[in-house]
Image (cartoon, grey):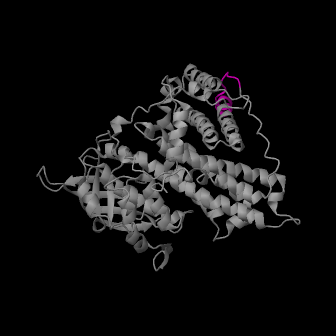
């Protein structure tokens, strides 16, 4: 999948990608299957982050055509690589501040041809792409929600490429370049932000999928390495501190895998609105932290070039932090905090567990990209206290009513101190909301697996919530009581072979494969 290029050195073989990427597009159009398209991308790239993100960037740009209703373009251009020509150096992800301008070539209202002029920055695939899906303004002096439009720009309209050297993902070619040539309007003029919002929710799943793949490459590699290595006559997994650390990593990996696929299984109506931001900000940060710890435990093996342990730990930083995406998504979640905490609709635990048992890991056409932005602005939240009570959780000290009351106490303190519109405290509000949701997800994880070994996942997420909650109080000097974390339940007494035990914790898919019909496998 790599070639030695005379200009760039060892890089992704873009011709290899171009020959195989139509299979990814086929899962997106004419019928949109988000998980299936991601699975194909992982297979083509052999789970290599450079390849997955290259394919992912092109697939997301292609998805803009679908979001915009450009079915003819989508059908006819499947043999091409695309780029997301959005960001500009002066504004990063603040897309309303871009300066690239589109000027209509004639007065014919039916004609969709424009001249595009501007400069884009930190764009993946751009030097080797066939088309650029470019965000531009008809009037660069405007910055409102109707100021943006999308354009399909051929490579021939782009000049002055300059590769930007990066610390990570060395096999990709990220560039800054100028656009000075013709382009075709995609969708309706002034509807760029609406099109982007429609595509952005599924894009958060695709990005998180890459983090999950990195996790499932790196953690087993560390377990195998530590199970073979010999220190002082034993392999490190025989040492209780190393075993405990790897237990924590494996537990997190299994839970995070569940949280990702849980969101797909439950996706309907506005569920995508909240859980897309939850995955892109909260879950990717947790994966990044876990992969960093995995590298520390594995030691020097992680720095070997052919090992995924260090590679994925470094490359995973790209997914949540690029231009502050984790902050943007957390702020988006914070807008829902009052409805989230005070929802009164009731849901049935057994019905949701049955849905999970039937839908986890199943690549199904769910139409994520077909849901209009106006239809997903109010996610369907439900009464968390009533729901949590249905679990009969065998852990003293975790009570959802108390958790929610504590969050409300912090929100009151924020209001009382005149900080409701402060971006820092809005971020902290969204972060606490994400931690609460992760506790709910961990409870579902334990319930659907019917495995008490996973009860520590609930305690783990509760303790994470406590740490985040206490940090808000400490940093802002609020007159609100601190919370105390809980002790983990002890590890099983008869673990046997540590490698088998730890890898068994990761076999979440195997617990459900027997329940899938042949059509689903």
* Placement of 193 over or under 60, stated as above or below: above
* Residue appearing at x 54%, y 50% in the figure: 515
Query: Is residue 91 among the parts visible in the rendering?
Result: no
Q: Which residue lies furthest to the left in this view?
A: 108
Q: In this view, does 350 lie to the left or right of 21?
A: right
Magenta residues (range): 470-481
Quadrant housing residue 184: bottom left
Q: Closer to the camera, 293 or 427?
A: 293
Residue 227, given in percent of the width and then of the height, sits at 77, 63
Query: Is residue 191 among the parts visible in the rendering?
Result: yes
Q: Closer to the camera, 257 or 122?
A: 257
Residue 440, given in percent of the width and then of the height, sits at 59, 35
* Residue appearing at x 63%, y 71% in the figure: 306
Q: Closer to the camera, 285 or 239?
A: 239
Q: In this view, does 161 lie to the left or right of 398?
A: left
Residue 121, given in percent of the width and then of the height, sits at 42, 58
* Residue appearing at x 35%, y 35% in the figure: 375
- The magenta stretch spans residue 480: yes
* Placement of 322 over or under 162, stated as above or below: above
Q: In this view, does 62 lie to the left or right of 414?
A: left
Question: Total marks drawn?
Answer: 0
Q: Closer to the camera, 64 or 330?
A: 64
Residue 262, given in percent of the width and then of the height, sits at 53, 44
Q: Which residue lies furthest to the right in this view?
A: 232
Q: Which residue lies furthest to the top in this view?
A: 416
- The magenta stretch spans residue 275: no
Q: Is residue 142 left or right of residue 290?
A: left
* Residue appearing at x 55%, y 38% in the figure: 353
């Amino acid at each position: 999948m790599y070639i030695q290029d005379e200009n760039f050195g060892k890089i992704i073989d873009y011709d290899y990608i171009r020959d195989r990427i139509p299979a990814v597009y086929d899962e997106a159009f004419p019928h949109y299957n988000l998980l299936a398209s991601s699975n194909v991308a992982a297979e083509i790239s052999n789970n290599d982050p450079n390849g997955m993100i290259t394919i992912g960037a092109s697939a997301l740009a292609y998805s803009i055509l679908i979001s915009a209703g450009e079915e003819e373009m989508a059908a006819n251009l499947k043999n091409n690589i695309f780029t997301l020509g959005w960001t500009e150096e002066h504004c990063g992800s603040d897309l309303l501040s871009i300066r690239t301008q589109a000027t209509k070539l004639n007065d014919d209202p039916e004609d969709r041809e424009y001249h595009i002029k501007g400069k884009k920055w930190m764009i993946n695939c751009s030097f080797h792409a066939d088309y650029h899906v470019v965000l531009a303004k008809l009037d660069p002096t405007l910055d409102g929600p109707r100021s943006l439009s999308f354009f399909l720009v051929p490579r021939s309209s782009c000049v002055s490429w300059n590769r930007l050297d990066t610390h990570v993902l060395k096999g990709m070619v990220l560039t800054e370049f100028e656009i000075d040539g013709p382009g075709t309007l995609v969708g309706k003029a002034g509807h760029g932000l609406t099109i982007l919002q429609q595509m952005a929710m599924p894009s958060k799943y695709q990005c998180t999928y890459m983090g999950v793949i990195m996790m499932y490459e790196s953690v087993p590699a560390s377990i195998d390495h530590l199970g073979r290595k010999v220190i002082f006559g034993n392999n490190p997994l025989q040492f209780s501190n190393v075993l405990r650390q790897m237990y924590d990593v494996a537990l997190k990996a299994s839970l995070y895998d569940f949280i990702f696929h849980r969101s797909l299984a439950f996706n309907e109506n506005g569920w995508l609105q909240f859980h897309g931001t939850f995955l892109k900000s909260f879950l990717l940060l947790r994966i990044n932290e876990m992969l960093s710890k995995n590298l520390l435990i594995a030691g020097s093996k992680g720095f070997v070039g052919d090992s995924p342990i260090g590679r994925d730990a470094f490359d995973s930083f790209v997914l949540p932090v690029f231009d502050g995406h984790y902050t943007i998504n957390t702020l988006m979640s914070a807008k829902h905090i009052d409805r989230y905490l005070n929802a009164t609709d009731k849901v049935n635990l057994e019905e949701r567990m049955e849905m999970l048992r039937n839908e986890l890991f199943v690549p199904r056409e769910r139409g994520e990209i077909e849901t209009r932005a106006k239809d997903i602005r109010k996610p369907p939240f439900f009464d968390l206290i009533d729901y949590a009570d249905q679990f009969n959780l065998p852990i003293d000290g975790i009570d959802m009513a108390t958790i929610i009351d504590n969050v409300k106490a912090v929100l009151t303190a924020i209001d009382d101190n005149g900080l409701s519109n402060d971006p820092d405290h809005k971020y902290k509000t969204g972060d606490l909301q994400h931690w609460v949701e992760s506790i709910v997800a961990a409870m579902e994880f334990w319930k659907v697996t019917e495995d008490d070994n996973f009860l520590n996942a609930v305690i783990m997420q509760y303790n994470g919530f406590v740490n985040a909650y206490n940090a808000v109080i400490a940093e802002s000097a609020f007159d609100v009581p601190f919370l105390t974390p809980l002790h983990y339940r002890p590890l099983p007494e008869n673990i046997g072979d540590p490698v088998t035990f730890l890898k068994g914790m990761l076999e979440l898919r195997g617990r459900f494969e027997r329940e899938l019909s042949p059509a689903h496998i």
